[in-house]
């Protein structure tokens, strides 16, 4: 059983703390019990509204790897702030299903979602 802990238990670089605070986001380690049955085993983080849930396994990553993951998830916080929670979820799901129908492959469909493409671009930036 995982316990949820605030990210305050972890020390992020000041720049990352500023990004998290600027987005009005919260980072929690572990997943709430109600969410676990809905997650695939390989999910390392998920953003719901302004809360970023990070798996215990991902929280144990090296500093740079964890920072890249958080940059990715902060893009989703911004996307939800821009579009609204339910419109974001609707569009995200519709894109996934459309790509799944075309690709017939879950991983390729997931990687084709425009919201994910934008998040990976931010995650992979080298100028931060």
Image (cartoon, grey):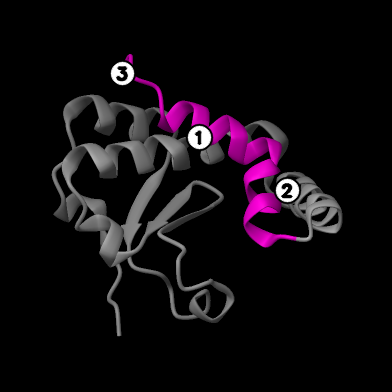
Residue labelled with disc 3: 128
Point out the stretch of residues depicted in magenta: 105-128
Instruction: Identify the disc placed on residue 92.
Output: 2
Give the prevailing secondary structure in the magenta stretch: helix
Q: Is disc 3 placed on a helix, strand or loop? A: loop
Q: Is label 2 or label 1 in front?
A: 1
Residue 118 part of the magenta segment: yes
Q: Callout 1 environment at 10 Å: few (<14), some (14 to 19), or many (20+)?
A: some
Q: Is disc 1 placed on a helix, strand or loop? A: helix
Q: Tell me which corner region of the image, top left, top right, bottom left or bottom right, holds residue 31.
A: bottom left
Q: Residue at x 61, y 34 (%)?
A: 117
Q: Which of marks 2 and 3 is nearer the N terminus?
A: 2
The answer to whether marks 2 and 3 mark residues whose Cβ atoms lie closer than 8 Å is no
Residue 58 versus residue 104: which sits nearer the camera?
104
Residue 55 versus residue 34: which sits nearer the camera?
55
Q: Which residue is drawn at 33% across and 58% down?
A: 28
Let me know if residue 100 appears in the view.
yes
Q: Earlier in the sequence, mark 2 or mark 1?
A: 2
Let me know if residue 80 appears in the view.
no
Instruction: Identify the disc placed on residue 120.
Output: 1
Q: Where residue 84 sits: x, y (%)?
A: 70, 41
Q: Which of marks 1 and 3 is nearer the N terminus?
A: 1
Q: Where residue 103 sits: x, y (%)?
A: 79, 53
Q: Where residue 69 sits: x, y (%)?
A: 37, 43
Mark 2–mark 3 Cα distance, whole angstroms, equals: 27 Å
User: In the picture shown, does residue 124 fall above or below 99?
Assistant: above
User: In the image, is 125 to the left or to the right of 49?
Assistant: left
Q: Residue at x 34, y 51 (%)?
A: 27
Q: Callout 2 environment at 10 Å: few (<14), some (14 to 19), or many (20+)?
A: some
Q: Where residue 22 sits: x, y (%)?
A: 39, 27
Quadrant where the C terminus sits is: top left
Quadrant where the N terminus sits is: bottom left
């Amino acid at each position: 059983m995982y316990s949820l802990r605030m990210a305050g238990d972890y020390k992020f670089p000041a720049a990352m703390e500023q990004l998290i605070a600027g987005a009005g986001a919260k980072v929690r380690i572990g997943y709430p019990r109600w969410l676990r049955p809905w997650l695939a085993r390989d999910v390392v983080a998920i953003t719901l509204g302004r809360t970023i849930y990070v798996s215990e396994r991902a929280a144990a990553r090296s500093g740079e790897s964890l920072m890249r993951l958080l940059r990715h998830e902060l893009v989703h916080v911004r996307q939800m702030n821009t579009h609204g929670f339910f419109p974001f979820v609707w569009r995200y799901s519709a894109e996934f299903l459309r790509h799944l129908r075309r690709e017939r492959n879950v991983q390729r469909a997931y990687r084709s979602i425009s919201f994910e493409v934008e998040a990976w671009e931010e995650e992979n930036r080298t100028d931060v």
